[in-house]
Image (cartoon, rainbow, N blue to C red):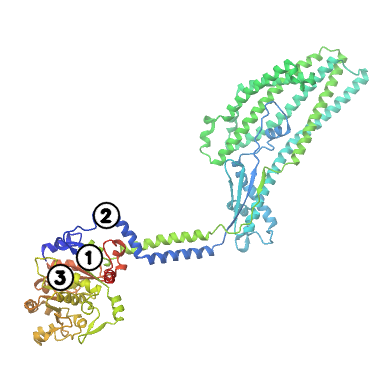
Amino acid sequence: MSEGNKQSFNSNANGSPNGHKSYRGEYYYGENSPVNEGDMEELDLKQLFGTIMRYKWWVAGIVIGAALIAGVIATTIQPIYQSSGTMMISQERNRYTWAGGTDLNSMMSSSFGVGAGSRIANEIQVLQSRTLAQEIAAKIHEQEELPNGEMFPVLYLEYPDRRTKITESMLASRLMQNMTVNQVSQETDILNISYESPSPLEAKTIVDMIMETYMEVSASQQRQRAGSAMDFLEEERARIQDRLAEAEENLRDYMRNTELVQVDGQTQAAIERVAELESQRQEVQVELVAVNSSIESYESQLNEIRPGLADQFAENVSSQLENAQLRLAELRTERSLILQRNPNLRNNPESEPQLVQLNEDIETVRNEIREITSSVLNADDSDVYIGFLENEDGGVTDRIVELRRNLIELKIQESQLSAQEEVINQRLEEENQFFDNLPENMLELARLRREVDINEQLFTEISTKYQETQLWEQTQSGNGQVIDEAVLPGSPTYPNTNRFILFGFVAGLIVSVGTVLAKETFNRTVDGTDKIRSMGYPVLAVIPDFHEYVTDRFNGRETVRVDGRSVSTSWTALIDSISPISEAYRRLHNNIVFADPDKDYQTILVTSSRKAEGKSTISVNLAVAFAESGKKVLLVDADLRRPNLNRLVGEDRAPGIAELFYDKATEEDAIRSTAAPGVDIITSGQKIPNPSAVLHSKKMVEFINELKNEYDHIIIDSPPYGVITDAAPLIQHAADGILLVAQFGETQVNELNHTVENLQQIRADVLGSVLTAYRYKESRDYYYYNEYTYDSYQAYEDYKEG
């Protein structure tokens, strides 16, 4: 093998021998290859796409199969239905009455916690709490049946198996697991409550139950808190009523015994002022009791979260605020006494300059208190508890912040009430000094009348508050208000059949592409010219698969009659010289002739890496191509083990090489003409026991070399060199060039490599390779390099039609 050709198999990436360039499986001179390094990235993407397209039916089959399987799975899964309803949560904030107002709602909300709403986050926690779930579970266990008469599916351990019921505790856990509560948006106080169940009616029923139970529980809690306030007010009313009866009895007895019936006007005015002050003090004391009760409740909740946390929050109430509240209490008490002495000023306060000045001073102090309170409520207290909150979950954090705010508000109100009580006590002490200067009998009468007036006023106030509280308790309906009741779902939310099918489609696509890429990775067959080129093997010609041609032209027959002989329909260069397959053989002839203009390839040996790759068909058709150019050609069937040339050309197997070698026939007898003009043939002859000995003999080499004097070209059909090395002497000493045949879709790359290595070992002059049985649309070329390769069969037909 020459050094130039040897390099063609090792270093020429384009696969062209002797420095020649290749194009579409052929070699030409003077032009650059259409594929350069700058296009490699594009080609890689094309190879990926091309690989998928080559196996598109695999991909389509796996994808469709996976989608169908996913759809079948979706139909076998127990469907789950979801129903939802919406409810608005009342968020009435704790109110602080700056002017010291004592209306019922303010007192009940800020003191006893009655009617005080929580943040939405807290109410979500309540709705998702085990306590509420247990209430609903108890109802379901008691009710058992849905409105349509069927049992609640949630009651059963494994629905639709109805043999085993679950306990109430397990039912509560299942309710919590299947229930979802979300705030519709941050700007609203509306919650969306949903529940999932295998029964659409159960999903709807349980959502309605959740909203109904929440309102019942919240209303019950409010009534329970209102009951605590009513108990206190009832006790106070009974106590004051007893005191009033006693005071009235004492007054009657004294007036009867002393015959004094009234006091003077000044004393009466003093009595009325004292009564007013006592009434105010009693009212303040009632509110203080309520506020302190609520403070204890909130502090207990904070200390449950973390001991000592309540004491740290309580320190937020500053001494500056206490001083301001004390001044406010003094001003309000003074204003109250002025109005008590002059009731007409209530409707016309501007007529009294002192009252006007008092109102201005009160408003100034109020504004000061507002500023101080706002700063206290908005303080982040980072040194106190922020580090602690960062270690807690969101629900606990929200709860702590809410409790902190409520506790500070109550502490502020407690401070105000205490200051007000202190001022009232001071004024009472001043008023009582007036009675010390009265005559003894008048002093006693004034004292007794004062007791009666004070207790009457207190009894009236307490009775009014008790009746208002009782009415308020009866009108409570809970914190929630249903906006949209749950609706009966018409279709299941799970499984979503379309989503399952989509998932199956995607999964199938991934699996199919992975399978195809794996198959392609381990595919070692020669399935395109690019694979041969990538290994550095020159491709002299690509011979289309002739089976479709034979089927169309000869109805699938294997032989036809030509010049009295039964020749194979694969001998297309003879029986149909204008076919695209014949044109491919002419292209092979031209590439051989012009492969090296300085060398005459007179003897060409055709071999392959394995049997049945088309080397015999190449031999007979190439012989016709040479003969068409006016050359005299001899075909030699040197494959003595599996001879095939005689069948293709329609000649008998003997006499042939075997008979010549053993001198059983003359050269004139062995060399026979064929149906192709200018083409003679020497067949293999009869089967012999040692074919290798014949081909390795010096006599055989000399015989071939002698025939060169009689023929322009000798084409030897040898055994497959990848399997048998019988033809080695002929390759070394008789052949001018070697054609290596590879069959499309059958020849293995490793076999081809092995054959080439063996040929290199004996320095064979390999002209190049020929790819047979090529099916363009099944090849890698069809998808990968469709700019540079084409279906020569179709192209030739298109050219003829044009």
Count all numbered tags in the image, as a single digit. Answer: 3
Residue 25 is labelled as 1
Q: Nearer the viewer, residue 735 or 159?
A: 735
Query: Marks 3 and 1, Cα distance to the nearest angstrom?
Result: 17 Å
Give the amino acid type for the residue marked by disc 1 in the picture. Gly
Q: Earlier in the sequence, mark 3 or mark 2?
A: 2
Report the Cα–Cα distance between label 3 and label 2: 33 Å
Q: Residue at x 58, y 27 (%)?
A: 375
Q: Amino acid at mark 2?
A: Asp
Q: Residues within 10 Å of mark 1 (few under 14, many from 20)?
A: many
Residue 720 is left or right of residue 182, and the answer is left
Percent of width and height locating residue 113? 68, 36
Residue 718 on image: x %, y %: 16, 76
Q: Residue furthest front?
A: 802
Q: Nearer the viewer, mark 3 or mark 2?
A: 2
Q: Residues within 10 Å of mark 3 (few under 14, many from 20)?
A: many
Q: Position of residue 710 (x, y in %)?
A: 7, 79
- Counting residues from the N terminus, which is met first, the one under dot 3 or under dot 1? 1
Q: Is residue 351 left or right of residue 548?
A: right
User: Is residue 252 shown above or below 750?
Assistant: above
Name the residue tied to disc 3.
Answer: 738
Tell me whether circle 2 and circle 1 mark residues in contact (CB < 8 Å). no
Q: Is residue 240 visible?
A: yes
Which corner quadrant holds the N terminus?
Answer: bottom left
Which dot, 3 or 1, sits closer to the camera?
1
**Amino acid type, callout 3:** Ile
Q: Are marks 3 and 2 in contact (CB under 8 Å)?
A: no
Which of the image's four quarters has the C terminus?
bottom left
Q: Secondary structure at mark 3?
A: strand
Q: CA distance from mark 2 to mark 1?
A: 19 Å
Q: Which residue is mark 2?
A: 39
